[in-house]
Image (cartoon, rainbow, N blue to C red):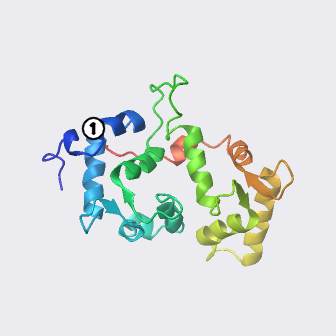
Amino acid sequence: MGCSSSSIKDIPHGPQLMQETGFSAAHLLRLYERFKFLDKDDIGELRPEDFREVTELAFNPIGDRIVNAFFSPGQETVDFPSFVRILAHFRPNDSNRSGDGAQPEPANSSTGKLKFAFQLYDQDRDGKISRVELLQVLQAMLGMHVTEEQLQSIAERAIQEADLDGDNAISFNEFKESLEKVNIDHKMSIRFLK
């Protein structure tokens, strides 16, 4: 499964994806090989069940939420360009890449990473994290280690601390502000080639 037999010309929209995501040719080649490996039926698209073959996702308590982030509502498959665009959120932030205002903010910017993390909680995509949505994530991550009462208490406190407008939910701006001291780039980065 080496990249030596492929080149950037073999990758659908390769140069455009390099520009858009900041991935190098070597990164894209490696991601393309991984995509083809996951595409067991060789249809050029991945389904949710293809992602569940990834061990790290299969054993991640919020793995299903991560998998669902690859798919827009009603979408049943994802092609290679979409796959790469989602993975770009996990690319370490490149401080040498400057935004000139004309181009959209890169997916791997702090704000891009926060938006991706926010959608893992905001499952109904209404722009708010409700107490129920927060509790669902906490149950997935901590459920076996804490009581239901403790989970309720954690969710209640998180809502109280982050909810600045008093609507009993967390908006993206509130989410962003509550995580301003967290190094989101470090927490949401994967070194694709070492």
Question: Residue 115, percent across and down?
Answer: 60, 47
Q: Amino acid at mark 1?
A: Ala
Q: State the residue lying farthest toward the left.
A: 5
Q: Is residue 45 left or right of residue 5?
A: right
Tell me what residue is drawn at x 51 percent, y 65 percent.
74
Question: Residue 167, percent across and down?
Answer: 84, 56
Determine whether the residue tagged by mark 1 lies in a helix, strand or loop. Answer: helix
Q: How many marks?
A: 1
Q: Would you place residue 80 above or below residue 193 in this image?
A: below
Question: Residue 42, percent across and down?
Answer: 23, 64
Q: Residues within 10 Å of mark 1 (few under 14, many from 20)?
A: some
Tell me what residue is drawn at x 65 percent, y 67 percent.
138
Q: Would you place residue 60 above or below residue 3 in this image?
A: below
Q: State the residue lying farthest toward the top.
A: 100
Looking at the rendered image, the quarter that the N terminus falls into is: bottom left
Q: Which residue is mark 1?
A: 25
Looking at the rendered image, the quarter that the C terminus falls into is: top left
Tell me what residue is drawn at x 74 percent, y 46 percent.
174
Tell me what residue is drawn at x 14 percent, y 45 percent.
4
Question: Residue 146, percent across and down?
Answer: 68, 74
